[in-house]
Image (tube, grey):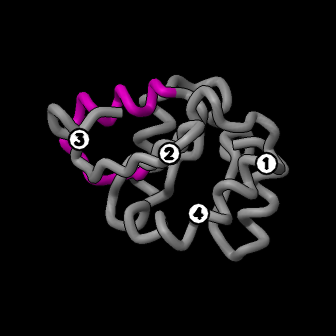
């Protein structure tokens, strides 16, 4: 998660951290995934590898929020997209889902992912 995005989310009283803050920036995705699950955090990323990790495990945490191709890459615009849609995705994130922001839609398959639910 980019620092501006993290700062804005933190200002809304969340527990947002960047992987650098917890010395995970050089770790592989499964390590980051496992730490997020253990701490009941939500992963915010543009890296679809987290979706593949979810599809290979039958888990309900951590939830993952993905910004896919076609969505804005500037942190301030990602933040606006997230905050605008937060009321409609918050329950899904809290109960275990992968929220996928695409250019023209938001997909929210619940966890655990099953064949057909897709990422």
Q: Residues within 10 Å of mark 2 (few under 14, many from 20)?
A: few
**Measured Cα–Cα span from mark 2 to mark 1:** 16 Å
Residue at image position (81%, 59%) is 7
Mark 3 or mark 4, earlier in chain: 4
From the viewer's perspective, is the residue at label 2 or at label 4 nearer?
Answer: 2
- Whichever of labels 3 and 2 marks the residue nearer the N terminus, that label is 2
Q: Mark 2–mark 1 contact, CB under 8 Å? A: no
Q: How far apart in space, not on screen, are marks 3 and 4 (Cα)?
A: 22 Å
Q: CA distance from mark 4 to mark 1?
A: 12 Å
Label 2 sits on residue: 105
Location of residue 26 with respect to 63 vertically, above or below: above
Q: Which residue is mark 4?
A: 85
Location of the C terminus (image quadrant): top left
Lateral position of residue 70 relative to residue 30, left or right: right
Quarter of the image with the N terminus is top right
Give the side of residue 116 with respect to residue 95, left or right. Answer: left
Picture quadrant of residue 81: bottom right
The furthest residue to the front: 104
Mark 3–mark 2 CB contact (< 8 Å) = no
Horizontal and vertical percent for residue 75?
79, 44
Question: Marks 3 and 2, Cα distance to the nearest angstrom?
Answer: 19 Å
Pointer 1: what residue?
77
Give x and y (percent) for residue 101.
54, 43
Label 2 or label 1, whichever comes before in sequence order: 1
- Residue stretch in magenta: 48-63
Of callouts 4 and 1, the N-terminal one: 1
Q: Residue at x 23, y 41 (%)?
A: 113
The residue positioned 48% from the left and 68% from the top of the image is: 88
Q: How far is the residue under mark 2 from the one under mark 4?
A: 11 Å
């Amino acid at each position: 998660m980019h620092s501006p995005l993290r700062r804005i989310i933190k200002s809304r009283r969340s527990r947002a951290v960047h992987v650098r803050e917890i010395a995970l920036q050089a770790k592989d995705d499964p390590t980051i995934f496992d730490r997020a699950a253990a701490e009941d955090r939500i992963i915010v990323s543009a890296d679809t590898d987290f979706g593949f990790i979810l599809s290979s495990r039958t888990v309900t945490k951590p939830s993952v929020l993905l910004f896919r191709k076609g969505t804005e890459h500037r942190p301030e615009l990602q933040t606006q997209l997230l905050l605008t849609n937060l009321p409609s995705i918050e329950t899904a994130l809290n109960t275990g889902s992968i929220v996928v922001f695409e250019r023209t839609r938001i997909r929210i398959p619940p966890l655990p992912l099953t064949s057909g639910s897709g990422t």
